[in-house]
Amino acid sequence: MIKLIDVQKEYENGTKALKGVNMTIEDGDFVFLVGPSGSGKSTIIKLITGEVKPSDGRVMVNGYNMGDINHKQIPAMRRTLGVVFQDFRLIQKKTIYDNLTFAMRTVGSRPSTIRRRITYVLNLVGLGDKANQFPDQISGGEQQRVAIARALVNNPSVIIADEPTGNLDPRRSLEIMKLLEEINRLGTTVLVVTHEKDLVNRFDKRVVAIENGRIISDGAGGYYNNER
């Protein structure tokens, strides 16, 4: 579960990024977080992943209080999260299999566990036959599927997808969103941060809209309209 309670965030330069945000994401939810550039979306992600701490209020992530989490607890907390970025962030000189292996070795997984898990997640994202290829040998949509597989390999309870379709054409974007929907159906909580209203509106999911540091709407089966 992710819970933000009366959260405020003011940066050292005086920017008030969040102004009393309240939001709860239950286990198993699929949530779109939407809003224009500078609305506070990125700050919420940074609070959830522990990059920054709230100036006031409470941020709870899978049982961890992010306001007073200590440095030694952060790696364990982050293992409960899988993050997917817009720019893929794959290691170009490693094969797809080795990209995923690297992610699992960093948390001390055994070789037998690595083999089983990588086979499973690559088949899940439809890339079971691409394990020995390099990122520059596959399409952008396939690279994003690898990024999703990498986010899944350590079996997190939550996937955070930060503008996951920003570098993809509409057809590939829809494919990625349907994949995230399937991952959610299998039990993983999914939070998708995006500004692509047409894509959001194709899915009957909860939509949380933020603007100027405040949540302006929050509803299941919401409709996102950023023309204000």
Image (cartoon, rainbow, N blue to C red):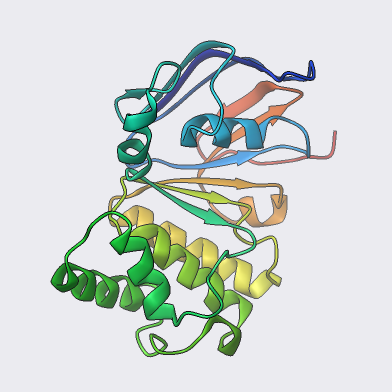
Left or right of 139, for residue 70: left
Compare residues 181 and 160 and report the one nearer the observer: 160
Judge whether 25 appears above or below 82 on screen. above
Quadrant holding the N terminus: top left
Left or right of 164, for residue 168: right
Quadrant holding the C terminus: top right
Q: Which residue is drawn at 59% across and 12% down?
A: 55
Give percent across and percent down for residue 69: 38, 22
Give percent across and percent down for residue 141: 58, 75
Residue 1: tell me if it is visible. Answer: no
Judge whether 91 appears above or below 177 on screen. below
Can you tell which quarter of the image residue 10 is in?
top right
Judge whether 62 appears above or below 194 on screen. above
Give percent across and percent down for residue 198: 70, 55
Judge whether 137 appears above or below 68 on screen. below
The extreme right residue here reads 228
Residue 150: tell me if it is visible. Answer: yes
Compare residues 46 and 200 and report the one nearer the observer: 46
Compare residues 197 and 35 and report the one nearer the observer: 35
